[in-house]
Amino acid sequence: MEHLLSERIKSTPPSFIRSILKTAADPEIISFAGGLPNPISFPQEELLVSMERIVRDYGSSLFQYSITAGLPELRQYIADRYNRKFGLALGIENILITTGSQQALDLISKVLLNTGDGVIVEKPSYLGAIQAFSQYQPVFYPVELTEEGMDIGRLKDALDHDVKFIYAIPDFQNPTGLSYSAENRECIRKVLTGREIVLVEDDPYGELRFDEGGRIPYIGAGRLPGSILLGTFSKTVTPGMRTGFMICADTELLKHISVAKEASDLHTNIFSQYLIWDYLMHNDYDAHIAQIRRLYKEQAQAMTEAMDRYFPKTVKYTRPRGGMFLWVTLPEGVSALSLFPKALEKKVAFVPGDPFYINMANTNTMRLNYTNADCRMIDEGIRRLGELLREI
Amino acid sequence: MEHLLSERIKSTPPSFIRSILKTAADPEIISFAGGLPNPISFPQEELLVSMERIVRDYGSSLFQYSITAGLPELRQYIADRYNRKFGLALGIENILITTGSQQALDLISKVLLNTGDGVIVEKPSYLGAIQAFSQYQPVFYPVELTEEGMDIGRLKDALDHDVKFIYAIPDFQNPTGLSYSAENRECIRKVLTGREIVLVEDDPYGELRFDEGGRIPYIGAGRLPGSILLGTFSKTVTPGMRTGFMICADTELLKHISVAKEASDLHTNIFSQYLIWDYLMHNDYDAHIAQIRRLYKEQAQAMTEAMDRYFPKTVKYTRPRGGMFLWVTLPEGVSALSLFPKALEKKVAFVPGDPFYINMANTNTMRLNYTNADCRMIDEGIRRLGELLREI
């Protein structure tokens, strides 16, 4: 049936991570490859209590078909939380529940992209986003990501092309762990003001800032009319239930996305929406998040301290202040991909940088996740990687 | 942002039913418009017991990210059940769990359709399928549905075009309630044998046959290599949890669909997959289904008996032997759509036939659902419709 396939699917790469994860399934391997939240994030006991309560209180509504936009009570909770934390003025009409943020990426491209339309992404960018967008055969314009955020000069150059949307992860970016500075955000906002372009700000990790303190405002949310903000409960409650959300001031745009969602899966699992909403209403969500943040801070520190100890000085790495990943840059000319099988021999895994770029091979970068191994394992894994890196 | 929209979304109609449902939300209205299963289908108490058991037994696996193809245990259960009931030879590699059957319709079109490719659908066909396919801008070739099944002459004519797939609902079709005869299935199979075309058989209602007795074999499953069979737990356990499945002998084709799924939502809610699997393993599923079938048989009979009593003889209707819907044909020239507001005045709702056709307006047909009102309400609703129909 090969010749029956659409051009679309031929240009959609299978996820490199998901193939790698199969290779790295050996339980003896210390894996920094996946992007799994630590199970501490799942409030299992509390969720079980919520399950019992909602079955008793809401009965068949939990199991019946539901509306495409999502549970009004959950959307109201989200609107209230963002209004309170970021001084926004959202109502439930600005919120659409999605089947994880991955679906949001698919729906946005579905609604905006004709073949050949331009999309600006960070260089490097999240591979799941590249995969979702690729299905709609756009032309990618990658813009260099620096310690400060997007390279503004290159962003302006990219905007000379016919671009439908910009995809950015301003906090604790996947894969790099970098965050955009307040100044960089302000510059981007100025560059985009008045332009007919959608800014998609993906924020799965914003809640995972290691240290207390005010968050930097979003680039677009509340400020650029066509901007879309993505959020999720995957990193703070459960990824397995695939419950994300999209926030957009432009309700007309959101209506089109809602039609695409209706055609794609009718609505997101309503049981899980009730469950997460009930959990949020009956528990101290912020205290739960604080617990995750403390753990991830320890784990990230264990990883960078081990790198300080075991890695040669020619190897560079980011020092994230939140999120789940850090990014390693090897000396120029060294292919992280070619190191991958040797690392597996030493029973340690990472993701080579290539799939985070558009059509690049044998880059000298790699992504490491620190949230799903304990500090002792992190130290041991980095020690083994260090051995390998001293041989190059 | 209107001019930023893709051609794709401009050609995707919003669901007529979902707009209608809003109009018909008035609790005083007797609604035959939706397609809601009766809440008797949801084994709430048993599901709660399963929830408690799986949280205890599987812990964090319920809440973590999972594989795209779906829970192996659930896929094995599905393979076993179909092998037993239909003499198939499926393994778990032939099963992909989808976020409801609606996602299956989206993914199949995503993987097969380039703009302008042909799709054969029944005339009339399921509006959610027409909506899903429309996103990929195909050319539709509708083939008349008769009391026997697809009109074979017209099917052959349609196959003269460049067609990627055929979409059919051979048992208790939505919207008509008609089923394909064994002879008709055999004819279709012969016509398709040796052709490079995918047959998509959608079977959400097959389990809902009113009377015991052997089911007629599928057209393609186990016989046509490129055929895809769709199934779901939406009508027999819960639609709210959006758990459907795709069965396909061609594992290469299924791999491509799996890549599209990965890009669309990573995987289906894993908690719900564990839950449904545990429910199936610990309860008498067939006894549960038998209970639903008895109720729907009563409800369908109540509806056709009321039609016999209250409808003028010029109005025709199908007499389904299973499923959730029946189809009414008014005298030629009478628009069901123009009757709709008058019916609402009498506090009764149905779906005018138009959205079940490709680009047809003011057809003389309507779809009625009988599963979500009790027999007394059904009688009263049909009596009111009868009053209206005697005025035309």
Image: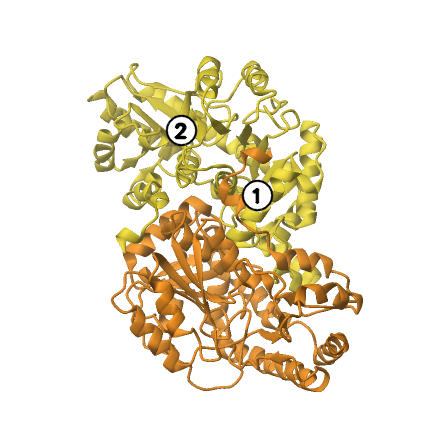
Chain colours: A orange, B yellow
Identify which residue, A267 or B375, lies in the foreground. Answer: A267
- Going by the numbered disc 2, the residue's amino acid type is Phe
What percent of the width, then of the height, locates residue B309?
A: 33, 20
Decide if residue B230 is on the left or right side of residue A203.
right
Mark seen at residue B257: 1
The quadrant in which the N terminus of chain B is found is bottom left
Mark 1: few, some, or many residues within 10 Å (few <14, many ≥20)?
A: many
Left or right: residue A361 versus residue B171 is right
Q: Indicate the position of residue B136 as horizontal and vertical percent values.
A: 42, 40
The reply, left or right, for residue B362 in relation to residue A327 is left
SS under mark 2: strand
Query: Can the viewer see residue A375 in this picture?
Result: yes
Residue type highlighted by circle 1: Ile
Q: Chain of mark 1?
A: B
Displayed quadrant of residue B269: bottom right
Seen from the viewer's position, the closer of residues A206 and B116 is B116
**Residue B298 pos. (x, y %):** 47, 29
- The quarter of the displayed image where residue B138 is located: top left
Q: Position of residue A328 (x, y in %)?
A: 62, 75
Circle 1 SS class: helix
Q: Which residue is mark 2?
A: B140
Q: Chain of mark 2?
A: B
Q: Earlier along the polypeptide chain: callout 2 or callout 1?
A: 2
Tell me how far mark 2 sits from mark 1, CA to CA. Answer: 22 Å
